[in-house]
Image (cartoon, coloured by chain):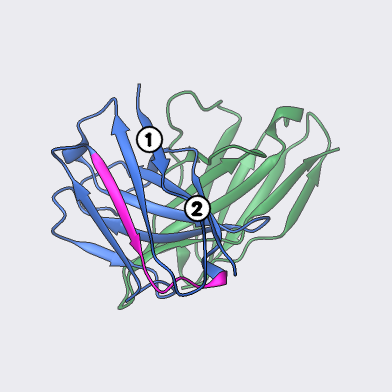
Amino acid sequence: YVLTQPPSVSVAPGKTARITCGGNNIGTKNVHWYQQKPGQAPVVVICFDTDRPSGIPERFSGSNSGNTATLTISRVEAGDEADYYCQVWNSGIDHGWVFGGGTKLTVL
Amino acid sequence: EVQLVESGGLVVQPGGSLRLSCAASGFTFDDYAMHWVRQAPGKGLEWVSLISWDGGSTHYADSVKGRFTISRDNSKDSLYLQMNSLRPEDSALYYCAKDMGITGDGHFDYWGQGTLVTVSS
């Protein structure tokens, strides 16, 4: 199972960033999103498509339908600049976890 | 406070072996599945392996199947990864990560800071 993310997304401060994650019928799976800043371990920012863990700002939201899941970051701040990864559990024959290739978010 | 501290990363020759460890604290270790995830320098995240809460179920990425073995000692709150027949492409920062559930199909809610493995002659 393959997850496809754009390598990079750029956005001006205060605007909205949308990072997509494409996969075959991904809408039938639970999608999780991780933020990774340079030199740091990943942190989950969205779980189960739309849930925001404790401590994650309301500016972060998620959606998932059809063949595309989307992480949306509203009112982008400089501190949001990071790599973002989507993740799903592949319950097929070769079951296991799959990460997307990652998207570098640049705040202009 | 949940803490995951990896150790055991070294420089090793191709074909060699290495055992990574992850010491867990701040939560009831045997209530959760655990994972190893790796990240090659400048590259993305790659899931490596998972083990269920009781060690009864394990899964591996195809890239490591037959060469790596995940295990846990719940009496020591510790997770391990035995790595054999190492290849240069196994060079990466290896993270230990806690699953939010017992079987390993939840998301990863806590991560360690990683231990670096370099496979080179």
Please state, as top left, top right, bottom left or bottom right, where the C terminus of chain A lies in the image.
top right
Determine whether, in the image, residue B97 is placed left or right of residue B25.
right
Residue displayed at 84% across by 36% down:
A12
The hue of chain B in the figure is blue
The hue of chain A in the figure is green
Point out which mark residue B4 bears.
1
**Residue B79 falls within the magenta-colored stretch:** yes
Residue B107 horizontal/vertical position (percent): 37, 47
Residue B78 horizontal/vertical position (percent): 25, 41
| Marks 1 and 2 in Cβ contact (< 8 Å) | no
Task: Say what secondary structure mark 2 lies in.
Answer: loop
Residue B100 horizontal/vertical position (percent): 30, 41
Q: Give above or below for B120 relative to B66.
A: above
Distance (Cα) linking label 1 and label 2: 19 Å
Q: Amino acid at mark 1?
A: Leu
Residue displayed at 81% across by 30% down:
A13
Determine whether, in the image, residue A45 is placed left or right of residue A8.
left
State the residue in front, A33 or A67.
A33
Determine whether, in the image, residue A14 is placed left or right of residue A30.
right
Q: Chain of mark 1?
A: B
Point out which mark residue B120 bears.
none
Residue picked out by circle 2: B10
Q: Amino acid at mark 2?
A: Leu
- Which of marks 2 and 1 precedes in the sequence? 1
